[in-house]
Amino acid sequence: MPTEPTETNQPEEKMTKEDVNSSKPENVAASAVVSNDSDILPQRNEASVNVLSNSARNDTNNSASNSPPHQLDEIQNTEDAVDAADAVDGVDADENELLRRMRADAVDNTMYSKKFILQTMMTLSQLPPQTPLETELEDELCKLWDMSVSKEVVDFLLLNDAIDVIITAIEASEDVRLYEILVGLLGNMCAQVECVEQLTSNPEWVELLLRLCTCMDTCMLLQLMRVYQYVMAHVVTGKEQLGIDWYICFAACDSSAKNLGFILQQCISEELLVAALKAINAVLASCAMVEEESSQTDLNLKPFAEVFLVQELVDGVNNAFMRLMRDDLAKQAEELGDATASAANVATTDEEDDEDESGVPKITCDIEIIQTYLNICTILVQLPEAQLSMASHTANIMCCLTRILIFLQQPTQLHPLGERQEEYLEDMAHICSCLKYCYDKEMFENLLSVWLTLRQHIEDYAEYDENDFEAFEDESRSQYEDNAFKLLRLLAHMLITVDHDVMVNDIAHLDAMKTELLRCALQEDVLLQRAHQRLNLIINDAAGQAK
């Protein structure tokens, strides 16, 4: 098992570990937001080997990643092939015997070797404790890792108690490369629900996988996040008992949520940040669903907030998202280590590569990451019991939502307005409502800009004539109207809740034309009259101060 890491001598692409003390935040009950982010394909060994950053592993990694899997082409109906071979004149009896032996050694209808699998697992089980992983065994385990994408191989491994061998080997070793291979192998196996059921049947095995979050190795953590995702993917497809068992283990391990937050706070690998966010989303969604559905039973599960609503996890989610949503200039500045020099260099070279038409640095981000963050945030803020606990995180959440609004103002994001963008706006409105429409200057300004963009598209609809119909045939005017009103209502709520003096000071920095368009829009709708009156007072007081 891994020991507690230190914070000194950090290698590149590694994480540090700091001692974390357990804490008990405010209580919450949860209702789940289930994401599809857990739908991931089985990962082959090559993908894992290629992301290794520790130079001490290079020699062994190259041999493992470049070697072909220990397999032959799959042969269907092997027995028919043997019978056909017997009927051919001149076929040697030795060849027939070889085919029969291959058939007997094959795993079901594949041509993977039972003997190889059993020998590899036997060698692993006999590995002395604290023994470094040798090249030959590493190569064999990597081949088995590749083979584990086959359901037939997984079934054979489960039949021969492979999980017990894997867990025992991890517990007896401190070799992070061995951790990575074995956890990656287990991740592929967890694509099959039978493996997850067998794994979950032993709470000590689950506890070990939770403790592995304290390991510093980036590559191993990537594989561990895949294990979490696969397990939770089975939970949301109807295996609720699996979710209950894992929930109990998370609750029993006081530092489990803190360790997940620590990964997000300390990791320097964007690949791991993405994997960790998706895994956390899957864990929170599944556990929130389990807790809500079990609230009417006698299971007496530990409250969701006590298990997951911890500062380390919430801060980690917000910090990781802001890192992934950096604009191109910020990313280049970080790579060069000098923000001033980088910004000056980029501004004088190829601005079109890093800025949109408005001159704003471009944000490049996997769009699924935005939805993943919004899912996590929704789970954490929507429960009544969570309101007090989340108050201290409101400012960071608003910064993240502002980043999404800036992203949406880039070309092609709102024109046309797609289903995914509508989901972003819907989720942001819901999160803001849970946070009592807390006012934030940057959030308000960018929300106003997005609303004006939608409003402009609505006006474009009104101006086109019949000859221009084809330009709008793929768009829906009502779609823009519905979403524009949604944002207008959000702006109105913020105006009502904001401190008068604060808004009077901020209104002076807003574009006067934008402010007037907002005032007129609020006046047109009877439901927003209160916000209209409030904005009039703010504008008048701001004008008085200006004199």
Image (cartoon, helix red, strand yellow):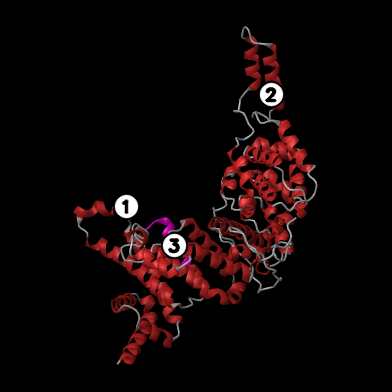
Q: Is residue 156 left or right of residue 281?
A: right
> For the point 70% across and 55% down, which residue is it?
209
Residue 252 picture location, percent across and down: 74, 63
Q: Quadrant of residue 488?
A: bottom left
State the CA–CA distance, disc 1 to disc 3. Answer: 37 Å
Local packing at callout 1 (Cα closer than 10 Å; few below 14, some 14-19, many 20+) is: few
| Magenta-highlighted residues | 417-429
Rendered residue at 67%/36% (across/down)? 153
Q: Is residue 338 above or below residue 509?
A: above
Query: Can residue 309 be found in the magenta stretch?
Result: no
Q: Quadrant of the N terminus?
A: bottom right
Labels 3, 2: front one = 3
- Judging by the rendered image, the residue that carries numbered circle 1 is 474
**In-front residue for pair 5/340:** 340
Identify the residue under disc 3: 332
Q: Could you tell me if residue 226 is visible in this image?
A: no
**Image x and y of residue 256, in percent:** 69, 63
Q: In the rendering, at what x and y percent does residue 179 appear?
A: 69, 50
140 vs 372, left or right, is right
Q: CA distance from mark 1 to mark 2?
A: 58 Å
Q: Earlier in the sequence, mark 3 or mark 2?
A: 2
Give the residue number, with chain letter if any, for mark 2: 102
User: Against 457, is 158 above or below?
Assistant: above
In whole angstroms, how far apart are the C-alphas of marks 3 and 2? 55 Å
Q: Amino acid at mark 1?
A: Asp
Quadrant (top left, top right, bottom left, bottom right) of the C terminus: bottom left
**Dot 2 crowding, Cα within 10 Å, few <14, some 14–19, many 20+:** some
